Image (cartoon, rainbow, N blue to C red):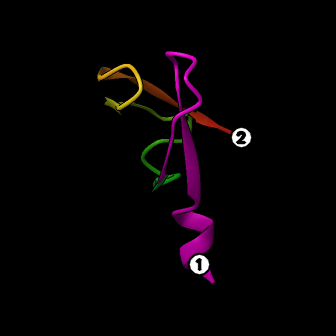
Amino acid sequence: MARNEIRPIVKMRSTAGTGTTYVTRKNRRNDPDRLVLRKYDPRVRTHVDFREER
């Protein structure tokens, strides 16, 4: 079960306030802090920052 401990599944929520989410995996060794990715938000029809939610 080392896979779940090292690369957990995280939910990414849009900073645009639309409630859009993405689900991804992250590597805790490389990214111990909260993850921020720039992804497409279909409700705003543009790319915005998505932050890891816990």
Residue occupying the point 71% across, 40% down? 54
Q: Which residue is mark 2?
A: 54
Residue farthest to the top, as pictured: 16
Q: Nearer the viewer, residue 52 or 6?
A: 52
On the picture, is 50 further left or further right than 41?
right
Mark closer to the observer (2, 1): 2
Q: Nearer the viewer, residue 37 or 26?
A: 37
- The amino acid type of the residue labelled 2 equals Arg
- The amino acid type of the residue labelled 1 equals Ala
Local SS, label 1: helix
State whether residue 49 is above or below residue 21. Answer: above
Local SS, label 2: loop
Residue occupying the point 59% across, 30% down? 19
Give the magenta-colored segment's residue range.
Answer: 1-23
Residue 2 in magenta stretch: yes
Q: Nearer the viewer, residue 3 or 20?
A: 20
State whether residue 37 is above or below residue 29. Answer: above
Considering the image in quadrants, where does the N terminus appear?
bottom right
Q: Position of residue 45 (x, y in %)?
A: 30, 23
Residue 17 in magenta stretch: yes
| Displayed quadrant of residue 5 | bottom right
Q: Position of residue 17 (x, y in %)?
A: 57, 17
Q: Which mark is residue 26?
A: none
Q: Which residue is mark 1?
A: 2
Q: Position of residue 50 (x, y in %)?
A: 46, 29
